[in-house]
Image (cartoon, rainbow, N blue to C red):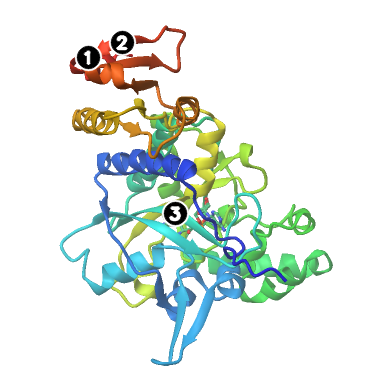
Amino acid sequence: MSNTLQAIRGMNDILPDEAERWLAFEATVQQWLARYGYRNIRMPLVEQTALFRRAIGEVTDIVEKEMYSWKDELNAEELTLRPEGTASCVRAAIEHSLVYDGPKHLWYAGPMYRHERPQKGRYRQFHQYGVEALGFAGPDVDAELIVMCAALWKELGLTGIRLELNTIGSSEERARFREQLIKYLEGKVESLDADGKRRMYTNPLRVLDSKNPAVQDALRDAPSLMEHLGEDSLRHFDAVKSLLGAAGVEYTLNPRLVRGLDYYNLTVFEWISDALGAQGTVCGGGRYDGLFAQIGGKPTPAAGFAMGCERLIALVQESRRATNVAGPAAYIVWQGEGTGAYALTLAEELRAQGLAVVQHAGSGSFKSQMKKADASGAQCALIVGEDELKSGEVTYKPMRRAEEQRRVPRAGLAALLRQP
Ligand code: HAM
């Protein structure tokens, strides 16, 4: 048996090439969040299990099958690695009275944990950027959340991400719909899978969310929640749709869209790409006006969404635009008596002027240093030998365009490297 230890399945190392893409992605996302007036909040990775049970719902995939939970023997506490951020964010807002003096725009980022079957785009540790508008009741906020997503996709150079939109009304409206849906499901019980049969009475709306094609087939003529909605819910939804229309954001109405978590009401939405295979949902969210009260706070309207970093970064990479990180401005190749100090001070001088410079580390033949310069993606090699040292010059060799190498004075180098 091999003795080598490996990372846990579904929990990935992010190696330097990829990590640079993550940094570029995160810089774009954080600037975008600041433009919309959102402020950062950081919550612990571990919470009491009861928080997620109450917030996400007992009869959901996440709570039933996917949480990393354990009993902390020392304190006799039931704990869970967070599977998502909304519950913690609302818990923190209640605990620290964050909305006592008015609504708040908050964002958080970091790893989330779900014990799912790993596959491309689906991991057990994955990362989200979560965006929560706490204390806002109007449809204008729902629309703004959606419009801001559209703006981010554009900024990231992503096309082909489509928006699916639905309203699931209020909990009273859903309760009335529930009776009818159960009756319908009773007539289709033969076609339901084990999950469907089990959830038919405990949480029939979850059955609508089934990913099983056979179950979806059986639901073809299921009653529609939309027909059970009252005037207020419909008016809210109409306002969201008309604002999206005004902003030029296209959407598809999907009456089956209920989302995988139970805290939602009214507007729900998902952004989906077909370029990622089965795991195409890059972002999902909606309104959750009941959640504050559900976990012990004062009733407070709220809405938000979270996006999956792994999926979005894969899309950015695939579209070969935007955040493809360029190599450094220069790679310094040096060889000969006294050239080490010359190279070191040259590199520092250029870095002090804001240029990214990699100095060859250790020795190595001229040829092998040039190979490394090429592999680094640098725009040019700066070659320092004993001749250059004597004359106070550098040999400048462009690596990415057909231009001859030439000797240049050390003094004007920064300006030369900045030339497009
Ligand atoms: P969610 O739909 O469960 O919503 O997750 C949001 C996004 O996280 C998904 O659209 C997907 O991109 C990504 N994601 C989820 N699970 C995985 C996984 N196993 N591997 C890779 N990516 C994944 C929420 O978590 C809600 N808290 C969103 C929200 C915020 N609603 C209101 N505010």
Disc 2 residue: CB within 8 Å of ligand 1: no
Q: Is residue 292 left or right of residue 61?
A: left
Residue at image point 67% right, 57% down: 223
Residue extending farthest left: 101
For the residues bearing labels 3 and 2, Cβ distance under 8 angstroms? no
Q: 37 above or below 418?
A: below
SS category of the residue bearing label 3 = strand
Nearer the observer: mark 3 or 1; the answer is 1
Q: CA distance from mark 3 to mark 2?
A: 49 Å
Residue at image point 29% right, 13% down: 419
Residue 13 makes an appearance in the image? yes
Which disc is residue 391 wearing? 1
Q: CA distance from mark 1 to mark 2?
A: 10 Å
Question: Residue tagged by mark 3?
Answer: 128
**Residue 71 coordinates in the image, percent (x, y):** 48, 87
SS category of the residue bearing label 2 = strand
**Residue 353 coordinates in the image, percent (x, y):** 19, 28
**Residue 135 coordinates in the image, percent (x, y):** 27, 59
Disc 3 residue: CB within 8 Å of ligand 1: yes
Q: Which of these two is toward me, 354 or 120?
A: 354
For the residues bearing labels 3 and 1, Cβ distance under 8 angstroms? no
The amino acid type found where label 3 is placed reads Gln
Q: CA distance from mark 3 to mark 1?
A: 54 Å
For the residues bearing labels 1 and 2, Cβ distance under 8 angstroms? yes
The amino acid type found where label 1 is placed reads Ser
Nearer the observer: mark 3 or 2; the answer is 2
Q: Which of these two is toward me, 311 or 23?
A: 23
Q: Quadrant of the C terminus?
A: top left
Residue extending farthest right: 190
Which disc is residue 407 wearing? 2
Q: Is residue 1 left or right of residue 138?
A: right
